Amino acid sequence: MSKMKTRKAAAKRFKQTGTGKYVRNCANARHILTKKSSKRKRRLGRATAVKSCEVSRLKASLPYGL
């Protein structure tokens, strides 16, 4: 049986932690930053966990756990 292909778009956007969880970057942190508060911009700069309802789709996209 041939190898499964990794979806490269997902590989660029998501990472797997040591405990097996997936993390992603927050949206809305790229432009139009003047109207956003400093607290909000700090929070958007940190990575956040992927919701549990999306993990099954993500595991199919990243078969080797990138």
Image (cartoon, helix red, strand yellow):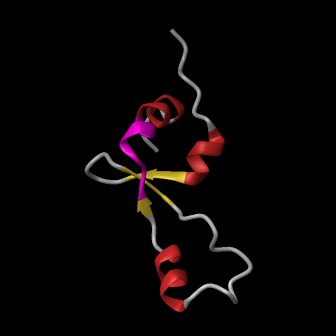
Rendering coords of residue 4 (x, y %): 54, 22
The total of numbered circles placed on residues is 0
The residue located at (60%, 64%) in the rendering is: 27
Residue 52 position (above or below residue 2): below
The residue located at (57%, 46%) in the rendering is: 11
Which residue is located at x 64 percent, y 69 percent? Answer: 28
Q: Is residue 40 left or right of residue 34?
A: left
Residue 36 percent coordinates (x, y): 62, 85
Residue at the right extreme, as displayed: 32
Q: Residue at x 56, y 89 (%)?
A: 37
Identify whether 51 is placed above or below 25. above
Percent position of residue 60, x then y:
49, 28
Residue 37 part of the magenta segment: no
In this view, which residue lies farthest toward the left?
A: 19
Span highlighted in magenta in the image: 49-55
The residue lying furthest to the top in this view is 1
Measured as percent of width and height from the top left, residue 65 is found at: 42, 40
